[in-house]
Structures are given as structure tokens and as C-alpha cells.
Image (cartoon, helix red, strand yellow):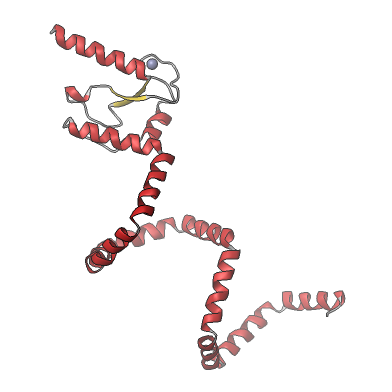
């Protein structure tokens, strides 16, 4: 055991001799490369197990660190992705082609879990499901469609019904300003928040007008 005095002296030494210490470590490493590699090879399983334990123990810090890294290297990452887009796509296609059978087997073997996972996702993200259903309805009517997210419309319209100007509740409709049936598109430009009631009244009025003319 070192005394507090010895510890303080050691800390001071380490703090003031950082450069030499690093140079020494590097020189030692370079001079003993072969032994170090042999040691690592021999201890491979043990080192791998230690790594798993370390990563498990420091999960949160590691995730935070990689998130920070991704955040600070966003531009490089995007540039790299752009520069290697074609290769990445080709690789993904080739991989898919050569692993088709395994993929199908995996899907088949994990059928129940996969169904449970997507059911849970749909339950947790009702808005995403509603977005998809709205696109499908619009497609059926032959309308030009854009990927419209209810969450984005809600934010943009600040929770206000565009027909009566009052706040909507939990249950609200996407109203197509120009109805899909009249050639309106399913797009952000043509979508607005509405109370279900206001939406239905508007639809009934349009129906009435169509009957009049
Ligand atoms: Zn309303």
C-alpha cells in the first residue's frame, strides 16, 4: 500500500512527465510488438470477454460518446456517404442476392416475434400508421401523393382546426383543402388540421354543391 504522501508524489510525477511516459510506452510497444501480438493471440478469448463486460458496464457513456462523435462529424459522414453511395448500394444489392435463402429462413424461423414486434410498433406509433393509411387512401383515389406526417401537420398548424379556428382534440382529421375527389393532392400544401366534425360538415357541403350544379 502506498501512503497518501507517496500517492501525491506519484500523481505529481505522472502529471508532469506525461510526454516522456507516453514516449516510453510507445518505444516499449514498438520494441515488443511480436511478444505483444503473441500475448494478445493467446489471451484472445479472455480479452474478448473483458471487452463485452466493459461495453456492458459503460453502455451509456459509450452511446453518448458515439452520438457526440456522429454529431460533430456530421458533415464528413454525409460527404463520405455521398462519395461512396454507388458502392454501398452495389454491396447491399450483392449481399441481398447472395443471402436471399438465409434471409428467408430467418424470417420464417422468427415469424411470431416479427409479427409481435410490428404489432407493438403499430400500437406505439398510431400516428405513423394513420399517415400510411392516409397515403393509401389517396393513392386509391389516384391522387398525387407526398409522404405527409400527421406529427408535422400538427406542429405546423399549431393544433388549430383550419375550418373553425379552434383547438383540436386528440382525435383529428387531415382535411384536404382541395378534396382528393376533385383532383387535390395528398401533400403538405393541400393538407390541414380539422376537427372530425368540421371535416365531415365540409365534405357534406361539397357533396351538396355537387348535387346542385
Ligand atoms: Zn373545427
- Which quadrant, please, contains the C terminus? top left
Q: In terms of depth relative to the viewer, which is nearer, 40 or 170?
A: 170
**Quarter, ligand 1:** top left
Percent of width and height locating residue 50? 58, 75
**Left or right placement of residue 92 versus residue 161 in this view:** left
Q: In the figure, residue 125 lies in which quadrant?
A: top left
Asked where in the image residue 95 lies, by quadrant, the reply is bottom left
Could you tell whether 93 is left or right of 110 in the image? left
- Residue visible at 23% across and 69% down in the picture: 98
Q: Residue furthest top?
A: 212
Quadrant (top left, top right, bottom left, bottom right) of the N terminus:
bottom right
In the displayed structure, does residue 30 sit left or right of residue 156?
right
Picture quadrant of residue 197: top left
x then y, percent, for residue 205: 25, 11
Position above or below: 42 against 62: below
Where 124 falls versus 37 (above or below)? above
User: In the image, is residue 114 above or below residue 186?
Assistant: below
Name the residue located 38 percent from the left edge and 41 percent from the top edge.
Answer: 122
Left or right: where 69 falls relative to 204: right
| Place of residue 149 in the rendered image (x, y in percent of width and height, measured from the top left) | 35, 36
Q: Is residue 144 visible?
A: no
Answer yes or no: is residue 191 visible.
yes
Q: Nearer the viewer, residue 160 or 112?
A: 112
Amino acid at each position: 500500500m502506498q501512503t497518501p504522501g507517496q500517492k501525491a508524489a506519484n500523481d505529481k510525477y505522472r502529471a508532469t512527465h506525461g510526454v516522456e511516459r507516453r514516449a516510453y510506452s510507445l518505444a516499449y510497444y514498438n520494441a515488443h510488438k511480436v511478444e505483444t501480438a503473441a500475448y494478445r493471440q493467446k489471451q484472445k478469448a479472455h480479452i474478448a470477454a473483458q471487452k463485452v463486460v466493459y461495453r456492458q458496464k459503460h453502455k451509456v457513456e459509450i452511446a453518448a460518446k458515439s452520438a457526440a462523435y456522429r454529431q460533430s462529424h456530421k458533415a464528413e459522414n454525409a460527404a463520405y456517404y455521398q462519395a461512396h453511395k454507388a458502392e454501398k448500394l452495389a454491396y447491399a444489392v450483392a449481399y441481398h442476392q447472395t443471402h436471399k435463402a438465409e434471409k428467408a429462413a430467418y424470417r420464417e424461423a422468427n415469424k411470431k416475434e416479427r409479427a409481435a414486434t410490428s404489432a407493438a410498433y403499430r400500437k406505439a406509433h398510431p400516428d405513423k400508421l394513420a399517415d400510411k393509411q392516409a397515403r393509401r387512401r389517396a393513392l386509391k383515389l389516384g391522387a398525387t401523393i407526398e409522404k405527409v406526417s400527421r406529427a408535422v401537420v400538427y406542429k405546423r398548424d399549431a393544433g388549430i382546426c383550419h375550418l373553425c379556428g379552434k383547438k383540436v382534440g386528440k382525435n383529428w382529421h387531415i382535411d384536404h383543402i382541395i378534396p382528393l375527389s376533385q383532383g387535390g393532392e395528398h401533400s403538405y400544401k393541400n393538407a390541414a388540421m380539422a376537427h372530425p366534425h368540421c371535416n365531415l360538415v365540409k365534405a357534406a357541403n361539397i357533396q351538396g354543391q355537387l348535387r346542385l350544379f
